[in-house]
Amino acid sequence: MEIDIVRLMFTRFCPAALLAVVMQCGGPQLLDAQATVSPVVPDWAQPGSATHKQVAPPADFHRPSRNFATPIGIFAGQSDIGGALVPGSASYDRSTGQYTLNSAGYNIWYQRDEFRFLWKKMSNDVSLAADASFPDPNGYDDRKVVLVVRQSLDDDSKEAMLGEHGTGMIHLAQRPERGAQMTDMEFRFGGDLAGVHARRIGIEKHGDEIAIFVSLKGEPMHQFGPPITLHFDGPFYVGIGFCSHLPATPDTAVFSNVLLENLPGRLR
């Protein structure tokens, strides 16, 4: 098929006209092929490996979060924080009380995050706990399930979180101000606990103190390490999240027996 040269020049400036040309030349099949092209991943976002070290994003790099104010289970809404290159999803099984989160995302770290987040707006004190698991045993080691308190839904929000990694490592991390670099306290297990994933995890906000709690093998939940001090203005966002740590490859996490109360000291 011949295409008028003037028309092609016009499409450089008119996306709608370009779409018309694509439809004439290749039809829906060409559009489908283009839709399946893998997204371009910046080098800094590539996961760490034997030949590559992941580094912080450029200081001015941001992507808007995709937010959905649609209730899911006990949560008021959900978001793809940081607009990961591949959209995430979540579902809730009322019969089992399980939440299944699917998400790509380069990390929840540095000065910005990418992850699927199920949230509820709250104020004052909070207790949040859940059993969490990774259905695929072969996912990336640094993928993580998280229990999070965030000031906003922006990718660079102030936040405090409990993260449990694919290796079983647990940390209490914080971004003390919007756009700041995250810091953490990390807890790794050896000996008879090598490779153990905590049976249950929890985070508690009591005033400006935030602490994490675990049950490693089914024992009563107990505080893990010292608390941090971080102030949040109410209302803030509290919820569960997951990041595959692969910027363009989703993975899955499952949360069950989720407890969320507007009081401290309720973790169990």
Image (cartoon, grey):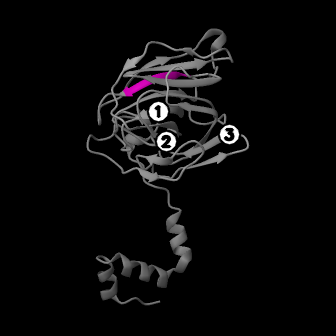
Residue ID for mark 3: 97
Residue ID for mark 1: 148
Q: Mark 2 or 1 closer to N-term?
A: 2
Q: Nearer the viewer, residue 28 or 76?
A: 76
Tell me which residue sits at (59%, 12%) in the image: 190
Please give left or right for residue 250 compared with residue 156 in the image.
right
Dot in front, 3 or 1: 3
Q: CA distance from mark 2 to mark 1?
A: 9 Å
Residue ID for mark 2: 119
Q: Residues within 10 Å of mark 3 (few under 14, many from 20)?
A: some
Amino acid tagged 3: Gly
Q: CA distance from mark 3 to mark 1?
A: 19 Å
Tell me which residue sits at (46%, 55%) in the image: 39
Q: Which residues are magenta?
A: 169-174
- The x and y percentages for residue 121 are 44, 40
Determine contact: label 2, label 1, CB under 8 Å.
yes
Rendered view: 162 above or below 71: above
Tell me which residue sits at (37%, 81%) in the image: 17
Determine contact: label 2, label 3, CB under 8 Å.
no
Which element is circle 2 on? strand
Q: Residues within 10 Å of mark 1 (few under 14, many from 20)?
A: many
